[in-house]
Amino acid sequence: MSTDLKEQLAAAVADLGLVVKPICEVQRLYNEHKKYLSGKILKNPLEEVHLLDENFPYWIKLENDDPSRPGTWIGSKANIVVPKLETGEFDDKGFIFD
């Protein structure tokens, strides 16, 4: 039954001329982070860890090709990546992550 519903929905979307762009893995991970982890504080006897959105690229070790040295990967800048993730416009082409 769910396959039939999926097919019907896909046909309805196609009839409307809408294009459904699948989200990339990084965007999916960020969406999960926003849903479950964003703003949380993890406490242990030694420290508190604040789960801030701007640290997300560092947690997944998001890297992009260094424009000044092709073939070399550098850590992606949160001030560039996070706004695109927030709006759902992030495309992972040209990026790698762990």
Image (tube, rainbow, N blue to C red):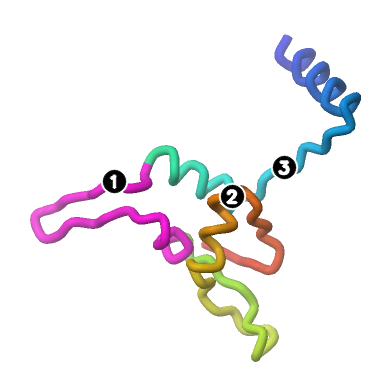
For this view, does 25 lie left or right of residue 45? Answer: right
Which badge, 2 or 1, comes first in the chain's sequence? 1
Mark 1 — residue? 40
The answer to which of 64 and 71 lies nearer the viewer is 64
Quarter of the image with the N terminus in it:
top right
How far is the residue under mark 3 from the one under mark 1?
A: 28 Å
Kindly state the secondary structure of the residue where label 2 is placed: helix
Q: Is residue 45 magenta?
A: yes
- Residue 42 to residue 56: above or below: above
Q: Which mark is residue 87?
A: 2
Q: Nearer the viewer, mark 2 or mark 3?
A: 2
Label 1: how many Cα within 10 Å (few below 14, some 14–19, many 20+) = few
Which badge, 2 or 3, comes first in the chain's sequence? 3
Q: Is residue 38 magenta?
A: yes
Q: Position of residue 73 (x, y in %)?
A: 59, 79
Mark 3 — residue? 22
Q: Residue at x 67, y 45 (%)?
A: 23
Kindly state the secondary structure of the residue where label 1 is placed: loop
